[in-house]
Image (tube, rainbow, N blue to C red):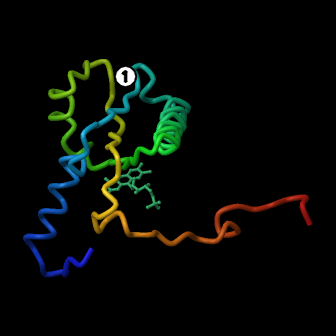
Amino acid sequence: MGIERDGKARRQDWVMRGFRQFDAPVSVVITVDRELANDTIAHFDCGAATYGLVLAAWSKGLGTVINGQEIMQSTAVRENANIPDDQVIMTCVAMGYPDEDFVANHVQSRRAVTDAAASFVGFA
Ligand SMILES: Cc1cc2nc3c(=O)[nH]c(=O)nc-3n(C[C@H](O)[C@H](O)[C@H](O)COP(=O)(O)O)c2cc1C
């Protein structure tokens, strides 16, 4: 990103950008019924739905950022998006057509090798 560790203003700007959902035109708020909040399967479903959402968006040419930072300001999210109290806010997803010229969109994350995360049994 070209932001130096001591570049306080630019680092702060980046943090604020996260709170602004990276200036995307759409913010999807992912919630779970409060009654199911202690049900670990509901959390799994929520992740699966979010994963499906971002892949479906990408298939239509839309970029997304699953943005957990919003949880730090969930009161503001609840107020602005009219989320009822019987819903627990899990995460937000910023969505919009990617700006290919924006420097963050040139970042390519490294991947661990598959064997570091999965074991294959019976395929030898
Ligand atoms: C649950 C979850 C929360 C995330 N929260 C943030 C966040 O708060 N800020 C951020 O910049 N990226 C966040 N990310 C990462 C971006 O969504 C990331 O770009 C996306 O997972 C693609 O990963 P990749 O860069 O490894 O391809 C989060 C991802 C996940 C799965």
Locate residue 85: give its quadrant: top left
Q: Nearer the viewer, residue 88 or 112?
A: 112
Looking at the image, is 96 positioned above or below residue 89? below
Looking at the image, is 13 positioned above or below residue 19? below
Q: Could you tell me residue 23's position as x and y percent?
A: 20, 48
Q: Nearer the viewer, residue 70 or 65?
A: 65
Q: Residue at (25%, 23%) from the top-left corner?
A: 83
Q: Could you tell me residue 19's position as x and y percent?
A: 19, 49
* 11 on left or right of 50: left
Element assignment for label 1: helix
Q: Amino acid at mark 1?
A: Arg
Q: Residue at (45%, 30%) from the top-left corner?
A: 38
Dot 1 crowding, Cα within 10 Å, few <14, some 14–19, many 20+: few
Q: Residue at (34%, 52%) from the top-left corner?
A: 98
Q: In the rendered image, which quarter contains the N terminus?
A: bottom left
Q: Could you tell me residue 63's position as x and y percent?
A: 40, 48
* 91 on left or right of 113: left
Looking at the image, is 107 positioned above or below residue 54? below
Looking at the image, is 25 positioned above or below residue 103? above
Q: Residue at (34%, 42%) from the top-left corner?
A: 95
* 100 on left or right of 54: left
Q: Nearer the viewer, residue 108 or 69?
A: 108
Check disc 1 and report the residue beneath it: 34
Q: Could you tell me residue 120's position as x and y percent?
A: 80, 61
